[in-house]
Image (spheres, rainbow, N blue to C red):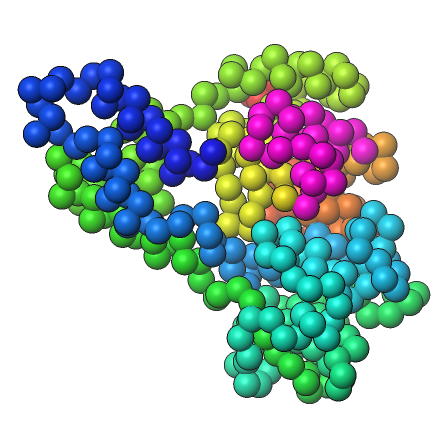
């Protein structure tokens, strides 16, 4: 259940339990609130990913070996397999082969007008494709004997396609929440917009994460089952979602442990189900610990992908990943998230 759905559900519960019938005309009913919220947001879960998110998702596969026909990051990817995997992580289904991928979305006239996240295709018929990252560069799976990497756009693309917008449509939808201030009891939202309004709503109507205590039994069980360091799962959940089982990131990561849809599918779990999410995250972390031999490197692989850790032979030089590892290790060492 998404955060918006949780708000609506909680509104209905509160309205049924605590709104006296004599005040029904004065107060915001659950149906009125839900209708207005739905109108303000549209589908808040659709169209939230951006081209920049595609670049971020693609970075996780840097260092994965090229394999012709490859569609599994664990064994190797070809150029179209990489593109399909990245966009699949963001909840966008693309065709399997490059010539078909070069027809999706909208056409971009020239490389000068290309934005990060656009697809750049080469040849006629198309035989190669990559993900543009700006400054004349792309992330692609080049050829046999090489790994997924950042490279120059080596020739004029025969097709440039924009599949994702430059900015998130959910951001503009959230800004419409300020319009809810005309409903009774919501006047405090008049000075708030976007995510601030959503935060105000979740606080006002009791949609909360529950904190670490709500999941301590799950963390303990999975820690013992997979032999993980004490407190690791809780620290990861705190950093990933602040213990919010309904969290969905702009890049498409879902749930308490912020697992990407494609990863969740591979693990056979529902990322929005805390029990399954914790078990899946525990298995991932155990695998990364066995592969890389240390907690910091396992955390880096969880955040940026194992390919990036292999490529840089250590924690990748991404600010997000380095801050992520630093924050979790500090919480582990101080026992904050234990």
Q: Is residue 314 visible?
A: yes
Q: Position of residue 248 (x, y in %)?
A: 51, 41
Is 123 inside the magenta-drawn segment? Answer: no
Depth order, front residue of 124/151: 124
Residue placed at 13% from the left, 35% from the top? 184
Splitting the image into 4 quarters, where does residue 261 fall? Answer: top right
Q: Position of residue 195 (x, y in %)?
A: 35, 45
Left or right side of 280 for 16: left
Depth order, front residue of 287/19: 19
Left or right side of 27 for 264: right
Residue placed at 87% from the left, 50% from the top? 75
Q: Is residue 191 visible?
A: no
Looking at the rendering, the stretch of residues picked out in magenta corresponds to: 262-287
Residue placed at 40% from the left, 26% from the top? 208
- From the viewer's perspective, is residue 227 above or below residue 318? above
> Which quadrant, please, contains the C terminus?
top right
- Magenta span: predominant SS is helix
């Amino acid at each position: 259940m998404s955060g918006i759905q949780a708000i609506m559900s909680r509104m209905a519960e509160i309205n049924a339990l605590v709104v006296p019938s004599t005040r029904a005309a004065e107060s915001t009913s659950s149906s009125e609130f839900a209708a207005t919220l739905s109108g303000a947001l549209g589908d808040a879960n659709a169209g939230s990913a951006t081209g920049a998110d595609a670049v971020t998702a693609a970075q996780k596969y840097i260092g994965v070996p090229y394999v012709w026909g490859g569609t599994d990051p664990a064994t190797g990817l070809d150029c179209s397999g990489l593109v399909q995997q990245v966009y699949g992580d963001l909840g966008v289904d693309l065709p399997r082969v490059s010539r078909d991928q070069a027809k999706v979305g909208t056409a971009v006239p020239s490389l000068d007008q290309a934005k990060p996240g656009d697809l750049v295709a080469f040849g006629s018929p198309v035989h190669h494709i990559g993900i543009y990252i700006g400054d004349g560069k792309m992330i692609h799976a080049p050829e046999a004997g090489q790994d997924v990497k950042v490279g120059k756009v080596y020739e004029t693309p025969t097709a440039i396609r924009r599949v994702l917008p430059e900015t998130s449509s959910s951001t503009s939808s959230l800004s419409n929440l300020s319009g809810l201030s005309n409903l009774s009891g919501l006047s405090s939202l008049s000075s708030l917009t976007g995510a601030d309004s959503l935060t105000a709503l979740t606080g006002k109507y009791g949609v909360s994460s529950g904190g670490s205590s709500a999941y301590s039994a799950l963390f303990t069980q999975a820690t013992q089952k997979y032999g993980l360091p004490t407190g690791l799962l809780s620290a990861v959940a705190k950093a990933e979602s602040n213990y919010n089982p309904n969290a969905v990131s702009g890049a498409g990561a879902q749930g308490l442990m912020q697992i990407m849809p494609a990863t969740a599918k591979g693990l056979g779990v529902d990322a929005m189900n805390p029990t399954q999410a914790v078990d899946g995250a525990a298995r991932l972390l155990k695998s990364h610990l066995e592969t890389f031999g240390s907690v910091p490197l396992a955390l880096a692989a969880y955040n940026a992908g194992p390919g990036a850790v292999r490529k840089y032979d250590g924690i990748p030089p991404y600010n997000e990943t380095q801050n992520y590892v630093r924050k979790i290790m500090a919480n582990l060492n101080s026992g904050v998230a234990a």
